[in-house]
Image (tube, helix red, strand yellow):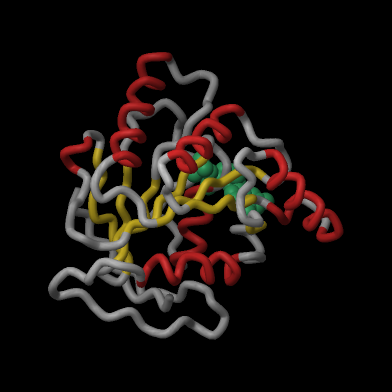
């Protein structure tokens, strides 16, 4: 998708604030520090839209970044940070489940796993849940630049084998070098176009950029 405009459309700390505007939604989830903000920024060609290295344990919210006024990239709060107190973990669970189970919920879920580490129990739990709910989902391996290129194929196979049910091949990416970003866009593009009719006043989707990367003219409007 050629990125023309991105904006923080909503930051919802309770389910009643999730947007229900009929726009397709692509959700990004994974443990804290997995590289989620960096990846969203890389995909959208933005720098500060999704904030990187936030202090763990701060108030959690589901952020909806609207792209070209017609698709939401949904940034779910990270999980698995040891120092987060139990009540906050419950809060996380409540919010994330409400989003994933809600109507409309995500058209496509992207579960991020650090390429250098095996998936955690929480990653598997989330994957189980997505599979049981019949939600379309893919696994993305982040920070692949930290591994030598010769290991990418084996690491990708091992990651797939670590999940039950076994996923479609994970996509290795690097937010630093841009490796894998065009491949990921090939997964995201159909989800951006799928199904629902675009809300009134939205722009039609334009043809993919030849390199598949997000090119943007950033206009951030904060509405939350
Ligand atoms: P989040 O908590 O999942 O949003 O993770 P961030 O995007 O804040 O990234 C966590 C840390 O990993 C930061 O120090 C990033 O600079 C680093 N990081 C993120 N993506 C990559 C990547 O693709 N390659 C490398 N080498 N570092 C990355």
Q: From the viewer's perspective, is residue 37 above or below residue 77?
A: below
Q: Position of residue 91 (x, y in %)?
A: 33, 24
Question: Which residue is outermost to the left?
Answer: 200
166 vs 117, nearest the viewer:
166
Query: As displayed, is residue 172 above or below residue 99?
Result: below
Which residue is the extreme one toward the right? 150
Q: Residue at x 35, y 41 (%)?
A: 100
Q: Nearer the viewer, residue 162 or 74?
A: 162
Q: How many marks?
A: 0
Where residue 150 sits: x, y (%)?
86, 59
For the N terminus, the image quarter is bottom left
Left or right of residue 115: residue 79: left
* As drawn, 60 above or below 135: above
Give residue 65's position: percent from left, percent from top.
Answer: 32, 57
Along the viewing direction, whichever of 46 and 12 lies nearer the viewer: 12
Q: Is residue 14 left or right of residue 86?
A: left
Say which quarter of the image contains residue 159. top right
Of residues 170 and 75, the one drawn nearer to the viewer in this rendering: 170
* Residue sitting at x 36%, y 72%: 193
Q: Position of residue 218 (x, y in %)?
A: 34, 69
Kindly identify the residue that appears in the image at 52 percent across and 36 percent down. 128
Task: Report the residue at 28% width, 55% height from top.
Answer: 8
């Amino acid at each position: 998708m050629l990125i023309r405009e991105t904006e923080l459309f909503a930051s919802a700390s309770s389910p009643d604030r999730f947007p229900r505007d009929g726009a397709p939604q692509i959700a990004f989830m994974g443990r804290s520090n997995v590289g989620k903000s960096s990846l969203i920024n890389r995909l959208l060609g933005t720098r500060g839209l999704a904030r990187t290295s936030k202090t763990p344990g701060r108030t959690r919210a589901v952020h909806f970044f609207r792209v070209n006024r017609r698709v939401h990239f949904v940034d779910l709060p990270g999980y698995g940070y040891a120092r987060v107190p139990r009540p906050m973990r419950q809060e996380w669970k409540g919010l994330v489940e409400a989003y994933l189970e809600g109507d409309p919920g995500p058209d496509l879920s992207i579960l991020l796993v650090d390429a250098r580490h095996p998936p955690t129990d929480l990653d598997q739990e989330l994957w189980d849940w997505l599979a049981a709910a019949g939600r379309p989902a893919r696994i993305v391996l982040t920070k692949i630049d930290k591994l030598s290129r010769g290991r990418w194929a084996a690491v990708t196979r091992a990651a797939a084998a670590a999940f039950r049910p076994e996923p479609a091949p994970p996509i290795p990416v690097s937010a630093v070098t841009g490796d894998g970003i065009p491949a990921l866009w090939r997964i995201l593009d159909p989800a951006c176009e799928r199904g629902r009719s675009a809300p009134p006043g939205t722009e039609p989707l334009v043809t993919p950029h030849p390199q598949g990367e997000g090119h943007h003219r950033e206009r951030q409007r904060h509405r939350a």
